[in-house]
Image: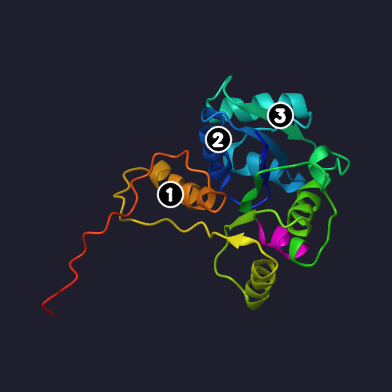
Amino acid sequence: MKPLILGVSGASGLIYAVRALKYLLEAGYTVDLVASKASFLVWQSEQNVRMPPEPEEQAQFWRDRASVPQAGVLRCHRWSNVGATIASGSFPTLGAIIMPCSMSTVAKIAHGLSSDLLERMADVQLKEGRKLVLVPRETPLSLIHLRNLTLLAEAGARIVPAIPAWYHNPQTIEDLVDFVIARALDQLDLDCIPLKRWQGGVNQNPTH
């Protein structure tokens, strides 16, 4: 099976990455994960924990957070290793998802900058015509943000903002998070999250 690339930027909302990884590994997927330099700071500020820099230790760190000790295959890459497998178009993948995705990362990818492995692998997905899904978590959006997102959409990326729905009757924060993850993975034709999807049922002939 071709691997899926999971990118984690320095945006708030690491729970999105953790929950996505949980479902992907439990479903037996192979995941190549790259976390940006800024994401280390987010782990400290949001969870008061230190993410180890070494790839082997980092893989165990992510598995512990996702509560998936053995299932699937997880390979972590150092953010500065622009010579990693996922930096090359000759390395086949199912596509890539960056979740959460900061506006800084959006801007750099939109303008073809590849200053680290996260940005480089996203650039590769676009140039190879592969699927790239971005889950931006920012509000409000400035005109600069909107224009950068438009550039990426025009280049073939799929934009899935971290905006949950309510028709599935969420009861927990995880329910809200999982909805966003499921819709993001839908763009990659992956369905591994138990989600109550829309079944219709709205009154089509209201009296008022």
Q: For the residue labelled by badge 3, is the local secondary structure a helix, a strand or a loop?
A: helix
Measured Cα–Cα span from mark 3 to mark 2: 17 Å
Q: Quadrant of the N terminus?
A: top right
For the point 77% across and 36% down, the residue is: 77
- In the rendered structure, does residue 104 fall within the stretch colored magenta? yes
- In the rendered structure, does residue 141 fall within the stretch colored magenta? no
Pointer 3 residue: 58
Residue 127, horizontal then vertical, whole percent: 78, 59
Which residue ends up furthest to the right in the rendered image? 83
For the point 75% across and 24% down, the residue is: 56
Camera-nearest residue between 107 and 205: 205
Of callouts 1 and 2, which one flags the residue occurring earlier in the amino acid sequence?
2
Task: Inspect the image, locate mark 3, and give the three-letter code of the amino acid beneath it.
Answer: Gln
Graded by Cα atoms within 10 Å as few (under 14), some (14 to 19) or many (20 or more), the crowding at tag 2 reads many
**Residue 171, located in which quarter of the rendered image?**
top left
How many numbered markers are drawn? Answer: 3
Residue 43, horizontal then vertical, whole percent: 64, 40
Pointer 1 residue: 179
Of badges 1 and 2, the one in the foreground is: 2
Pointer 2 residue: 24
Graded by Cα atoms within 10 Å as few (under 14), some (14 to 19) or many (20 or more), the crowding at tag 3 reads many
Q: For the residue labelled by badge 2, is the local secondary structure a helix, a strand or a loop?
A: helix
Of callouts 3 and 1, which one flags the residue occurring earlier in the amino acid sequence?
3
Task: Inspect the image, locate mark 1, and give the three-letter code of the amino acid beneath it.
Answer: Phe
- Report the span colored magenta: 102-108
